[in-house]
Image: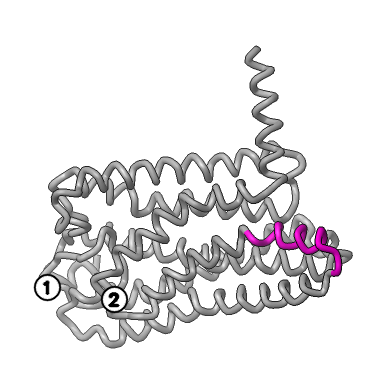
């Protein structure tokens, strides 16, 4: 209540893609289809990992956790975007704006650290195969799955609270399709220097640090793979981590470009579409089309359901 009383702005207007008036319906259809594909695809992965006995391993456990994370991540912003594209009312209350801002950033940072956890899992499996099953027991997997959530919700809280302490007296139009740090900070009447600085520092710990960890782990993995003599062995090692590396590059690439610039730019909302809509939609395909075990499990389940129907 104290935060609300510090400002005369009671609500914000999400401009989204209002400048593209003639493309609103088309954009709505495209985003809706991608959202449906993302929800269905990630939910399918969770079901496959849960029901397929051959997928009961640490690697697929982390993939299923990541898919559940993706379901939450896309649902924080996309429903509001879809509403804005077809409804003239683009308002969002002050409190709901900051709740969305915090949830989005917390889940986004969690994804960054989850990529690092998944990279660690692959590094351990490839470089220490004999110790892998001992180290990656069920308790270790649960701890590693919880860790990204714990650290990320703390990291995201700091810039959110600092930004909420700013004074907002107008204008209240956010040039984005969801409430994010830079677009909201740009509307502050008070000096946003500290808030921008805190956001930049948080971005280093939120995205750059786990990205460096992922880069280091995959460098270690690639060095190990180059030492494998057999072509079959190299292919098998690459197949277990290539999909994860592809997804990580797509996500980190767009996120780092946006969040290392605290003041933001006019292109941020278009880049945001990449990691809020496109990447979550592609991830189920990346993890299934290039994964033999997942495809075999899907095929077995399809055959079983077909026979059950008969």
Which numbered disc covers residue 96? none
Residue at 68% x, 25% y: name it: 303
- Residue 56 in percent (x, y) is at 74, 46
The verdict on residue 238 being magenta is yes
- Residue 210 in percent (x, y) is at 56, 74
Which numbered disc covers residue 169? 1
For numbered disc 2, what is the local secondary structure? loop
Mark 2 surroundings: few (<14), some (14-19) or many (≥20) residues within 10 A: some
Q: Which residue is mark 2?
A: 264
Q: Quadrant of the N terminus?
A: bottom left
For numbered disc 1, what is the local secondary structure? loop
Tell me the magenta residue range: 229-242
**Magenta stretch mostly in which secondary structure?**
helix
Image quadrant where residue 239 sits: bottom right
- Residue 176 in percent (x, y) is at 24, 63
Left or right, residue 31 beside residue 231: left
Residue at 56% x, 39% y: name it: 44
Image quadrant where residue 114 sits: bottom right
Q: Earlier in the sequence, mark 1 or mark 2?
A: 1
C-alpha span from label 1 to label 2: 20 Å
Q: Residue furthest front?
A: 231
Position above or below: 154 against 146: below
Q: Residue furthest right?
A: 130
- Residue 175 in percent (x, y) is at 20, 65
């Amino acid at each position: 209540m104290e935060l609300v009383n510090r400002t005369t702005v009671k609500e914000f207007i999400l401009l989204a893609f209002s400048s593209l008036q003639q493309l609103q319906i088309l954009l709505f259809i495209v985003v809706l289809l991608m959202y449906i594909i993302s929800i269905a695809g990630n939910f399918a992965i969770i079901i496959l990992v849960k029901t397929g006995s051959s997928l009961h391993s640490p690697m697929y456990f982390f993939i299923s956790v990541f898919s559940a994370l993706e379901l939450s991540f896309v649902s924080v912003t996309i429903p509001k975007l879809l509403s804005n594209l077809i409804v003239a009312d683009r308002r969002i209350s002050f409190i709901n704006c900051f709740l969305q801002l915090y949830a989005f950033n917390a889940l986004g940072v969690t994804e960054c650290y989850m990529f690092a956890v998944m990279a660690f899992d692959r590094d351990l499996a490839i470089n220490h195969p004999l110790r892998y099953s001992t180290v990656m027991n069920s308790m270790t997997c649960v701890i590693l799955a919880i860790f990204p959530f714990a650290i990320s919700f703390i990291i995201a809280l700091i810039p959110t609270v600092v930004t909420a302490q700013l004074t907002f007296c107008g204008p209240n139009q956010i040039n984005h399709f969801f409430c994010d740090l830079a677009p909201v900070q740009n509307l502050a009447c008070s000096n946003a220097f500290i808030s921008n600085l805190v956001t930049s520092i948080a971005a280093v710990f939120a995205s750059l640090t786990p990205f460096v960890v992922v880069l280091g782990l995959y460098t270690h993995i690639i060095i190990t793979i180059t030492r494998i003599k057999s072509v079959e062995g190299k292919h098998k090692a690459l197949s277990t981590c290539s999909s994860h590396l592809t997804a990580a590059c797509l996500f980190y690439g767009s996120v780092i470009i946006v969040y290392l610039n605290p003041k933001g730019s006019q292109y941020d909302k278009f880049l945001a579409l990449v990691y809020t809509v496109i990447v979550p939609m592609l991830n189920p395909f990346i993890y299934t089309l290039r994964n033999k075990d997942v495809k075999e499990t899907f095929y077995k389940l399809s055959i079983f359901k077909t026979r059950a129907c008969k």
